[in-house]
C-alpha cells in the first residue's frame, strides 16, 4: 500500500504543475501558439511572454531584485512597444487575415500602421478591421487581469502591458476628433487612418451601401449633415469613459506598485474584497465596438482557491436600439496536478440598427485545456463554436474554431 502511495506522489511530482517544486518557480511559463483567426487571445499570450521574458532579462542585467524601483524604467517602455504590436498584428492584421486580405505592417519610431494587399470586400470587413486594434488589446488585457486574480497571481512585469492595452481603447477614442465640432480634423483623421474616425465613417458607409474599396482607399465622401455621425461618436465616448473606470485594473496598478516596484516581488496580486479561505470578489468594467453597435461590460470576478469565475452583463447600443447580453468564464480550474481548464459561455441579443449587420440572438461556447508534459512543458488545446456575429477575440462567422500552443518554463 505504501509503495502505491509513493508511486502516485512520484507521478504527481513528474507532471510538475501542481507539485511543490513547480510552485517554487517564480516566473510564469512562456507561450507560443496560434488559433483560428483573428487569433487575438493566443497572439496576446505570445506578446505577454515577450514582455515577461524581456523584462526578466533586463532585471538580471540591472539586478532589479536589489533595486526594484528600476523595474518600471524598462517595463513600461516595453509594454508601450508591445501593446502596439498586438494592436496592429493581432488586431487589425488578425481581422484582415480572417478575411484573406493579406495584411502588412509598418513600424517606425513615430508610429505604426497596417496595410492590405487586397481591398475589403464589404463594409462589415472595414468595420471589423477598424475596431480590431483596440479589440485585440482588450482581449489580451482581460486574460492578464484574470491571471492576476488567480491564487498564484501573475508576474508584475505583465501589469504595465495590461494597463496600457486596457487604456488603448479609451485614450484612442477620447483624442479622436468630434465630427460635429471639428469636421476638418475628423476628415483628416479618417484620411490618415485614425481607427475611430474611420469606424464612424464606415458605419455611415454601411448605412448608405457605399463601395467598401472607396472607403478603404479614402475615396469616400463623408456626409457631415448626417446626425448619426455625432450619435455614434457620443456612444464611443461613453464606452471609453466606462472602460477607464475599471476598479479591477486600478487595483492591479496598486499591486504593481506595492508588491513589484517597492517590495521587489516578481509576482503580484491585486487587492480584492476578501471572504477568507482564499475566496474574494472584485468588479471590473470594459468595452468594445461591433460593426453596428457599441457594447459595455460589467464584470464580477469571484476568486476561489481553485480558479477565478468571471460573470458579466453587458448592453449593446446601436444608433436606434439597446439590447443586452451575458456570459461567464471559469479561468484556471484545476482538475489535477497536470490539468487546468478554461471554460467560457456567452449569449446576447443583437440590437436593431440602421446598419443592419447583426440580427437576433447570438451565442458562443469555448473550452481550453492546459496539460502538463513533465516539469517544464504545457500543451494548450482550445476548441469552441459560435453563431455568426461579433464577440471580441473570436471569428465573426459561425461554426467551430480551434487553437493550440506550447508553454515552456525555466
Image: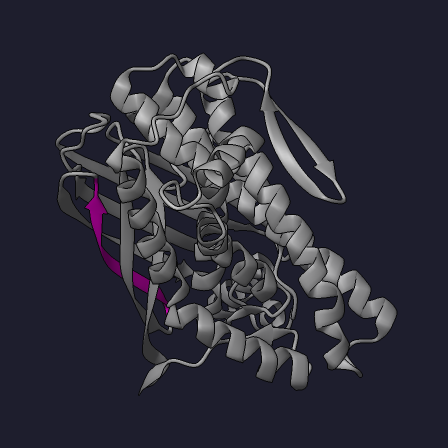
Rendered view: 224 above or below 325: above
Q: Nearer the viewer, residue 152 or 206?
A: 206
Residue at horizontal 53 percent and vertical 54 percent from the top: 165
Quarter of the picture holding the C terminus: bottom right
Quarter of the picture holding the N terminus: bottom left
Residue 31 visible (yes or no):
no
Question: Is residue 163 rendered to the left or right of residue 28?
Answer: left
Could you tell me residue 328's position as x and y percent?
Answer: 25, 54
Residue 301 visible (yes or no):
yes
Rendered view: 401 above or below 178: above
The quadrant where residue 335 appears: bottom left
Residue at horizontal 34 percent and vertical 15 percent from the top: 210
Question: Is residue 205 rendered to the left or right of residue 163?
Answer: left
Q: Nearer the viewer, residue 238 or 297?
A: 238
The quadrant where residue 211 appears: top left
Residue at horizontal 55 percent and vertical 33 percent from the top: 193
Rendered view: 348 above or below 313: above
State yes or no: residue 315 in magenta.
Answer: yes
Residue at horizontal 37 percent and vertical 27 percent from the top: 202
State yes or no: residue 312 in magenta.
Answer: yes
- Magenta region: 306-318
Could you tell me residue 399's position as x and y percent?
Answer: 29, 25
Question: Is residue 347 rendered to the left or right of residue 243?
Answer: left
Could you tell me residue 316's position as x and y percent?
Answer: 21, 45
Could you tell me residue 408's position as x and y percent?
Answer: 65, 51
Q: Nearer the viewer, residue 369 or 399?
A: 399
Amino acid at each position: 500500500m505504501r509503495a502505491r502511495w509513493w508511486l502516485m506522489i512520484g507521478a504527481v511530482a513528474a507532471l510538475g504543475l501542481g507539485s511543490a517544486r513547480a510552485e517554487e518557480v517564480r516566473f510564469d511559463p512562456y507561450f507560443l501558439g496560434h488559433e483560428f483567426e483573428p487569433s487575438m487571445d493566443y497572439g496576446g499570450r505570445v506578446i505577454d511572454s515577450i514582455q515577461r521574458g524581456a523584462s526578466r532579462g533586463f532585471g538580471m542585467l540591472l539586478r532589479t531584485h536589489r533595486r526594484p524601483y528600476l523595474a518600471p524604467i524598462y517595463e513600461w517602455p516595453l509594454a508601450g512597444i508591445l501593446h502596439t504590436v498586438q494592436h496592429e498584428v493581432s488586431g487589425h492584421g488578425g481581422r484582415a487575415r480572417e478575411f484573406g486580405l493579406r495584411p502588412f505592417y509598418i513600424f517606425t519610431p513615430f508610429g505604426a500602421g497596417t496595410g492590405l494587399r487586397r481591398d475589403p470586400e464589404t463594409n462589415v470587413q472595414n468595420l471589423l478591421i477598424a475596431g480590431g486594434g483596440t479589440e485585440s488589446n482588450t482581449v489580451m488585457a482581460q486574460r492578464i487581469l484574470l491571471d492576476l486574480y488567480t491564487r498564484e497571481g501573475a508576474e508584475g512585469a505583465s501589469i504595465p502591458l495590461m494597463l496600457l492595452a486596457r487604456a488603448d481603447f479609451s485614450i484612442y477614442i477620447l483624442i479622436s476628433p468630434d465630427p460635429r465640432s471639428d469636421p476638418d480634423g475628423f476628415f483628416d483623421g479618417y484620411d490618415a487612418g485614425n481607427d475611430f474616425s474611420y469606424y464612424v465613417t464606415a458605419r455611415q458607409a454601411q448605412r448608405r451601401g457605399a463601395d467598401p474599396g472607396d472607403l478603404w482607399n479614402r475615396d469616400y465622401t463623408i456626409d457631415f449633415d448626417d446626425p448619426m455621425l455625432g450619435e455614434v461618436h457620443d456612444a464611443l465616448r461613453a464606452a471609453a469613459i466606462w472602460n477607464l473606470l475599471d476598479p479591477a485594473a486600478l487595483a492591479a496598478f496598486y499591486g504593481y506598485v506595492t508588491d513589484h516596484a517597492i517590495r521587489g516581488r516578481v509576482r503580484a496580486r491585486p487587492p480584492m474584497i476578501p471572504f477568507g479561505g482564499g475566496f474574494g470578489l472584485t468588479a471590473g468594467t470594459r468595452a468594445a465596438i461591433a460593426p453596428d453597435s457599441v457594447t459595455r461590460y460589467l464584470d464580477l470576478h469571484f476568486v476561489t482557491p481553485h480558479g477565478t469565475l468571471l460573470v458579466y452583463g453587458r448592453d449593446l447600443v446601436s444608433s436606434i436600439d439597446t439590447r443586452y447580453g451575458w456570459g461567464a468564464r471559469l479561468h484556471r480550474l484545476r482538475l489535477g496536478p497536470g490539468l487546468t481548464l478554461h471554460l467560457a459561455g456567452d449569449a446576447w441579443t443583437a440590437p436593431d440598427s440602421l446598419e443592419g449587420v447583426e440580427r437576433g440572438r447570438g451565442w458562443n461556447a469555448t473550452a481550453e485545456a492546459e496539460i502538463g508534459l513533465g516539469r517544464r512543458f504545457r500543451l494548450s488545446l482550445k476548441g469552441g463554436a459560435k453563431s455568426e456575429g461579433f464577440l471580441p477575440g473570436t471569428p465573426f462567422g459561425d461554426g467551430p474554431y480551434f487553437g493550440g500552443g506550447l508553454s515552456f518554463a525555466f
